[in-house]
Image (spheres, coloured by chain):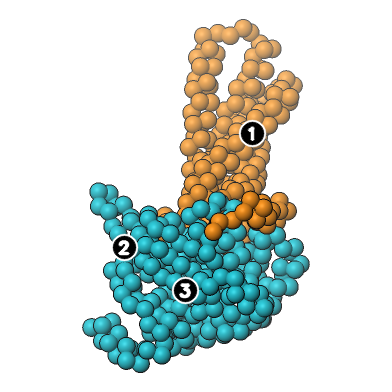
Amino acid sequence: MATAAAEVQLKHEYAVKTLGVVKEYVMGKQTLQALKGVDVEIRAGEYISIMGPSGSGKSTLFNMIGGLDKPTRGKVYIDEVDISGLDAFELAWLRCRKIGYIFQTFNLIPVMTAIENVTLPMIFAGMTTQDAMDKGAELLQLVGLGERIRHKPLELSGGQQQRVACARALANDPAIILADEPTGNLDLRTGHEIIELLRHLNKEKGVTVISATHDLKMLDASDRIIWIRDGRVDKIERRDELDIAIGTVEGENEA
Amino acid sequence: MSLTARESAGIRRQIKLPNSEAVKIAVRSLKIRFWRSIITAAGIVLAIAFLTYVVTAGSIENAMRAEDAPMDLAAMQKAATRIWLIAISLLICVVGISNAMLMSVTERYREIGTMKCLGALDWFVVKLFLIEAAFQGIAGSLVGAVIGVFAAVLAGMSEYGFAVFGSMPWGTLFLNIILALLVGAVLSTLGAIYPARRAGRMPPADAMRTEV
């Protein structure tokens, strides 16, 4: 798995690149610009946090990067491939195998048990049921839910549901994990555990992690932080520059 | 850089949902949401029972009259009323069944969006909901048809006594059940396909945002 990640890193310098991405929502007669031209470049193997106040457009950017929505203008490249040129099959393939998604609201399928949720992407990817079950059990073990694979989402706590979601995101060994406010619905400690888990996956498996968040705990784990404000990239910081920055940040956010 | 045709063809083969898996997922989903499924099916049962009752009562009456006299004025009026009743009960079927299916699919838009995030094609979503709808539609219609025929036979007995069994048009009754099954299955499938296709075509971000 590590070698595969290394290959990806050699082959494609940028895991994700956006060029002048604009997203407009039409609401009646008004047109709302959620993104006003965003350029970001994310290297394979990086841990990136997209930070910004709510309504700044970070979730919209997250949807664009993940191929979950189409930009009004501009381009999104994943592994150097322009995703606006992909047909339905290729887009499904991308979502299935290249990217793993984690959401603030967990978005587990309520009628399925933990293991069924985790194995669904593997079934879409054409894995046999037995192989999928084996791998699913392994992944749930990895996120610390080995004992609860037959539980349904509603029988699990929020933190446990998010762990299932993490395991599901890893189902087809994605190159990129996209997490939209993964700690938003969790208490401090559980949130911290999820961040640890993401950091671990990033370090051990070389997975590129991109996480939209306004949780300052995330800063510590990130290689770079992309600040979004009012639909634009406000600034991009590396973690080693962060010491100075964090004071102003907290000042801004808590004000 | 773009994908070559060969890569593209390879990708086509790599995304799939085998029928056996689809049936498994659909059945599981029906079982787990048992009471919700029952309520949806109940709508179908009632509509189809009404339709079958009206049609079958007509068949029985026709059969009884064939042995009696030619049609008098009262009988003609009755026949005309019956046609109206059939039209109305069909309308109830269309509205009732499609509404039941529309609701049961629409309330699961988020689930559909999530499935697309996990790599489902639009067609997978339609397939899963189609199988669920077909199961609900056929089961609901079968129960409804049996209830309808049973009620019509009871009504015939109360009107004509046990004589009704002497000239019972069993073949026609059987045909009525088949017809009702067909109507129920087609309507529930149509009622489910429409919202499932709509949700399947949406970008996943929109489907997950949609609140009903």
Q: Which mark is residue A42?
A: 3
Q: Chain of mark 2?
A: A
Q: Is residue B67 above or below residue A110?
A: above
Residue drawn at x 56%, y 34% is B50
Residue A184 can be seen in this image: no
Label 2 or label 3, whichever comes before in sequence order: 2
Q: Chain of mark 1?
A: B
Q: Colour of chain A?
A: cyan
Q: Which mark is residue B182?
A: 1
Which image quadrant is residue A113 in? bottom right
The percent position of residue B99, horizontal first and vertical second, equals 48, 43
Within-10-Å neighbours for mark 2: few <14, some 14–19, many 20+? some
State which mark lies toward you, 2 or 1.
Answer: 2
Which image quadrant is residue B54 in? top right
Nearest the eye: A221 or B90: A221
Q: Colour of chain B?
A: orange
Q: Is residue A124 above or below residue B73?
A: below
Q: Quadrant of the N terminus of chain A?
A: bottom right
Secondary structure of the residue carrying tag 3 is strand
Question: In this rendering, do the residues under marks 2 and 3 share a single chain?
Answer: yes
Q: Amino acid at mark 2?
A: Lys
Q: Amino acid at mark 1?
A: Leu
Residue A41 can be seen in this image: yes
Secondary structure of the residue carrying tag 1 is helix
Q: Amino acid at mark 3?
A: Ile
Q: Which residue is mark 2?
A: A36
Q: Is residue B206 left or right of residue B193?
A: left
